[in-house]
Each structure stands twice: as C-alpha cells, then as structure tokens.
Image (cartoon, rainbow, N blue to C red):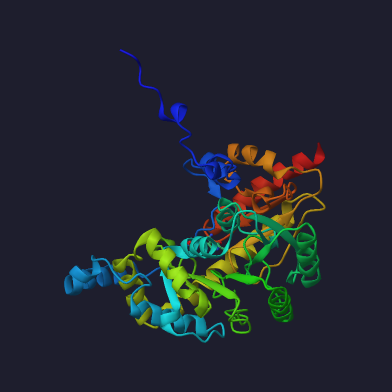
Amino acid sequence: MTQPVAIEQTVHALSDRVRSARPSEVRKVFRAAQRPGIISFANGAPFLDGLPFEKLAEDAHRILAEQGSAALQYGPGDGIPALRSHIVEIMRLEGIDARPEQVIVTAGSQQALDIAARVTVNPGEVVLAEGPSYAGGMAVFTSLEAEIIHVPSDHDGLIPDELEKAIAEVRCSGRVVKGLYTIPNFQNPGGVNLSSERRTRIGEICRDAGLLIFEDNPYGLLGFDGSTLPAIQPQFPDITLYFGSFSKMFAPGLRLGWVLAPDWLHAHLLNTAETGALNPAVFNQLMMSAYLDDPSWKTTLDAYRGIYRAKFEALVETLAECMPEGTQWNQPTGGFYLWITMPQDIDTEKLVYEAIERGVVYVPGTAFFTDGSGRNELRMSFCLPPLEDIRRGARILGELFTEAAAK
Ligand code: PMP
C-alpha cells in the first residue's frame, strides 16, 4: 500500500499571502516566556483583580435567568442597541458626537481594525504609521499585503512635517498612500500623547492629501490623572475611522470593541463584519452593557488609574537606580507602556532570551517597526505585575543591561 502524501506536498495548500508572512517577533517572545513565575513586562494585559466579580456573577446569572434565549441567540450584526448607546456616551467623553446607528460592535478593536483594513486597503498600497507602532495593528495591514511605512515621532507624537515628507516620498515612488494608522493617546508602544495642535495639523494634512485616518484609541480613558484629549474624529469625521475597545478600560476576556466610521463606509464595514463573524457575542454584550448601566464603573476605572500610576512610578524609580548610563525613557502620563532607548550597541532582541533565562520578559523594540529599526529599544508594560515584581524585575533587567553595556 502506498503511503498517503501530505497535502502540502501535493498542492500549494498555503495562500501566497500566508506563505510570505514573517513570523511575529512578539509571539515568539511570548511563547518563550510562558513559564511559571516569570515576571512579564511583555503583555499589554490589564490588571483585573480589582473588578467587582461578585456583581459580574450576579449580572451573568440575571441575564441568563431573565433573557437566556436572547442572550444565547444570534444577534444584530452591528451589536445590541443598548451597548451601542453606552459606546456613544463613552465616546462623548472624548468629544465625539455620534449616533448609536453609526457604531459597529466587534470582537475587540483588533477585529474592527481587520474589518476596516479589508474594506479600504489594497495589496501594494501604503499605510503610514508612527515609528514605533502597535505590532498587532500593523500586522492587520501587512497581512492584506499593504506596506507600513513609519513616520518619525517625538515626545509630542507623530511629527506633522515628517508626515508630509513621507506622503510626498511614497507618491514620488509611484505608490498609493491609503491612510495613516495612529494611536494618539498613551501610544502603544511609545507611551506618548499626540498634542492637540498636532491632531489638527495631522488631520488637515491627511484631508488635503486624500488619506484616511485610522484612529486607534484603546487607552484614551487611562490617563493617570483622568484627563483625556479630544479625539481626532470630531474634527475630521469624513475621513476618520475611530476604533475603541473595552479591553483596557474593563477586560479583554469579553472581546468587545467597536468602530465608528464615516457614513459612506458604514454599509461596507457592516457587510464585512457580518461576513467574518455574523455578529458579536450577544451574551458578552449584555454583560458589558449591564456593567456600564451602573455608574460605579467610573469609580472602578479611577481606582485602576491610581494603580497604574503607582506601578509606573515604581518602575521608573527602580530603573533610575539600576539601568546603565545612557539609557533613556519617556514620561508617559497614562496607558500601559514605557518605551526605553538603550545605548546604541545594546541589542535588546538578542538579550531578551537571556532575560527570560533570568526570569523576566519584555518586548524588544524591533517588534514595533516593520523596517528593522528598534534594535537598542524595548517596551515595558507596567500594568500587570504586582509592585514587588516590578521592582525585582526591573533590577534583574538593570543588571543584565549593565553587564551587556560593560562588554
Ligand atoms: N490597538 C492597540 C493600540 C492595542 O494596544 C490593542 C491591544 N493590545 C488593540 C488595538 C487590540 O485590542 P482589543 O482587540 O483587545 O480591543
């Protein structure tokens, strides 16, 4: 009897798109870091221990007891009206004036980004993004064979003159620039806020050049002092796709996010959302909606802001004591991330495996660029580890980098 031949040997089982995709650096690091007891500065995962679990359990019970067959049924493709109304109220906190019918609820903002990219981006087109930028967001565009080109940022976020330069350069090379992917608040991974003046200037540049703006904002309500800059969307509603998420302000486990887009894109987005997932999980939306019905969610969020600030302060205090000379970091005023620039000859991608051996993990800077930059940089998430682990983990890294700098 002849042996069956593996399918991948007989036909080209993989699409060209998948075959040419490069493995994600972050996922490699996460896999290597999955060992008990490791101190992880890698995950952008929120701290959840302070959530009102008893109340959530009561909500779950009540939802199933009172409306179980609706909760476990298929639902509207754009999400349940009650949650979309809450989303409109939440966006109002950032100066956005929208109607519930304009909102599409998704499985996290990650799915919203994917839907938006599918609707707007063609293979070979260019999407501009901050350098560095969120690896998962860039992957959405590159998985559809678009190219990410970085625009330099400084302590006030993306630099408008550099944006103009990048648009001109890409056009000069004969390619189409489709849009700008930006994370204006407490950026992942840079931790910076795009200044108000720049929000306006960048919007004007995009509008005048005929670009879309992909405004990704999962961290906007997580300023340490509770303040939030107005979003870009209200000034440029005709070209902005705004992405929100419950993952960081509540919990990622329900997988709920949303997209607010110009009306001319709405039907296309909804069609693509329904093609991919039929509808977002109704039970999860009812849970989220019940949580938001009680105004104490704002008090819980305030408590989280305090916790994150304390963790951030512990991290930078310890780093100041133990990192080698020439190390620099920014001063985020909210969010989850600290971006660190090491002396030039320190290779954070090589050293991360040694860090894991010593019980600590971070994400090397190269994960946040598509052009190989970031070798001497790294991102540390300070939101999840307990305070004592933050101090201990930072000391371990300080030692490792100090040894590396002395070589
Ligand atoms: N955008 C940014 C900037 C993020 O940091 C994340 C999560 N790390 C997401 C989008 C996706 O979040 P979610 O799908 O959980 O809403």
Task: Answer with left or right where residue 376 lies relative to residue 256.
Answer: right
Q: Could you say where residue 233 lies in the image, as x and y percent from the top left?
A: 59, 79
> Could one spot residue 127 in this view of the protein?
yes
Query: Residue most toward the top?
Result: 1
**Relative to residue 398, is residue 141 depicted above or below?**
below
> Could one spot residue 33 in this view of the protein?
no
Q: Quadrant of residue 72?
A: bottom left
What residue appears at the point 50 percent right and 58 percent down from the top-left corner?
Answer: 45
Q: How many marks?
A: 0
Q: Could you say where residue 330 lies in the image, as x and y percent from the top left?
A: 73, 64
Query: Residue most toward the front?
Result: 174
**Relative to residue 260, is residue 19 depicted above or below?**
above
What residue appears at the point 71 percent right and 56 percent down from the top-left corner?
Answer: 340
Quadrant (top left/top right/bottom left/bottom right) for the N terminus: top left
Quadrant (top left/top right/bottom left/bottom right) for the C terminus: top right
What residue appears at the point 41 percent right and 71 percent down from the top-left corner?
Answer: 105
Q: Could you say where residue 229 lies in the image, as x and y percent from the top left?
A: 63, 81
Q: Could you say where residue 93 lies in the image, as x and y percent from the top left?
A: 53, 84
Residue sitting nearer the eye, 328 or 158: 158
What residue appears at the point 65 percent right and 72 percent down from the top-left corner?
Answer: 333
Task: Answer with left or right where residue 391 lies relative to residue 89.
Answer: right
Residue sitting nearer the eye, 123 or 151: 123
Residue sitting nearer the eye, 125 or 225: 125
